[in-house]
Amino acid sequence: MVANRASFAYAPAQGALRVHCTATNASVVLQPVAIGADLAGLAYDDAGHFDGDAAATEGLRFRAGPDARSPLLRAADVAAKLARPRLVGDVVAGCAAR
């Protein structure tokens, strides 16, 4: 893990990058997603909020219950509750404000 003066800590997370604001304790994971020969970007937090390229979010699936038998929902089905169009920017702005 690497920390800098802006109160951010960066840590690799299995091919992704976790950005953590030590001042607010907010964090977000930046994940590259292969779409054919292209790469798309996906960001998500520990609460399940997400943002990213449309091609990356199309493949997301969410469990609608507590176990593996719960039905899977597509990102479009949960977007009203979990999509956060400025997820990364909000984490960075909240940290920079402190």
Image: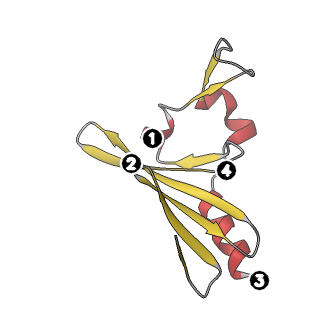
Cβ atoms at labels 2 and 1 below 8 Å apart: yes
Element at label 1:
helix
Identify the mark nearer the N-term, 2 or 1: 2
Eye-nearest disc, 3 or 2: 3
Tell me how far mark 1 sits from mark 4, CA to CA.
14 Å
The residue sitting at 51% across, 64% down in the picture is 11
**Residue in view at x 33 percent, y 41 percent:** 34
Q: Label 3, on which residue? A: 98
* Residue at image mark 2: 40
Q: Which residue is mark 4?
A: 84
Question: Residue 56 shows which numbered tag?
Answer: 1
Of marks 3 and 4, the one in the foreground = 3
Q: Residues within 10 Å of mark 1 (few under 14, many from 20)?
A: some
In the displayed structure, 95 sits above or below 38; it is: below
Give whichever of discs 2 and 4 has the lower sequence position: 2
- Mark 3 → mark 2, Cα distance in angstroms: 31 Å
On the image, the x and y values in percent for residue 98 come to: 77, 83
Q: Does the CB distance between marks 1 and 4 fall below 8 Å?
A: no
Query: Left or right: 76 with respect to 53?
Result: right
Q: Amino acid at mark 2?
A: Ala
| Mark 3–mark 1 CB contact (< 8 Å) | no
Task: State the CA–CA distance, disc 2 to disc 1.
Answer: 6 Å
